[in-house]
Image (spheres, helix red, strand yellow):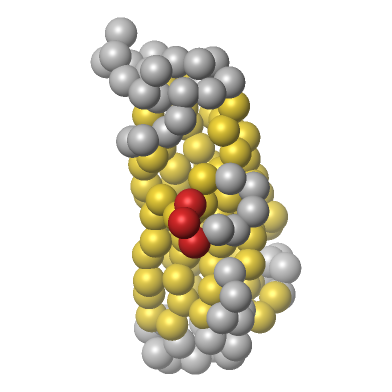
Amino acid sequence: MGFFLDMRSSTNSSKTGEGPDIQLGPEPERFGLIGLRTYLVPGPVVTFSGSIGLIGELGDTYAIEIVRGAEYDPNDVIYRAEGVLGVTGATETQAFNAQDLSAPWAIQTMYSSYISGVSTTVRNGPEVFTGIASTPFF
C-alpha cells in the first residue's frame, strides 16, 4: 500500500454544452495542465483520469494523449488512446485512465493532456484532467 503525495485537477468546463467550442485539428491541442509534487520520493506512481466531451459526425476520429511536461513533445507521450465517434450531432463524453509508472524522482513534475482529430469534431465539454501521485510502497 502506498501513501498519498499530491492530487491536482484541471477543469475547462464542468458540463456538457459549456465547453470551449474549439474544433479539433491534426495538431494536438492542450486541454489540461497539472503539476504534481512527489517530494523526491523514489519511483512515485502517478495515476490520471479525465474526460472530454466531443460532438461531430459518425466515424470522426480523435486521439487523446498525456505528456510528461508542459509543452507537447511526441517523445514525452506516456499515454495515447484513439477513438471514433459513434453518433452524429450528439455530445459523447470520452473518459480515460492512465498511469505513469516511470515518473521521475523530482520535487514536482508537470503533466499535460492533449487532443487531436478531424476538423468536423468540436470540443463541447465537459473537460477535466486529474492526477494523483503516491508512493509505490509504505
Q: Residue furthest top?
A: 138
Asked if 59 appears above or below 137 in the picture, the reply is below
Q: Position of residue 108 (x, y in %)?
A: 59, 27
Q: Is residue 94 left or right of residue 14?
A: left
Instruction: In the rendered view, tell whether residue 64 sits above or below residue 134.
Output: below
- The answer to whether residue 100 of the structure is visible from this angle is yes
Left or right: residue 20 versus residue 81 is right
**Image position, residue 8 (x, y; %):** 59, 34
**Residue at (66%, 80%) from the top-left corner?**
23
Q: Is residue 63 left or right of residue 8?
A: left
Residue 20 falls in which quadrant of the image?
bottom right
Residue at image position (38%, 80%) is 84
Residue 126 visible in the current orientation: no
Q: Which of 135 and 78 is in front in this view?
A: 78
| Residue 86 percent coordinates (x, y) | 38, 83
Residue 109 point in image, percent of width and height: 57, 33
Residue at (46%, 56%) from the top-left corner? 75
Residue displayed at 50% across by 16% down: 40
Question: Quadrant location of the C terminus?
Answer: top left
Q: How many marks?
A: 0
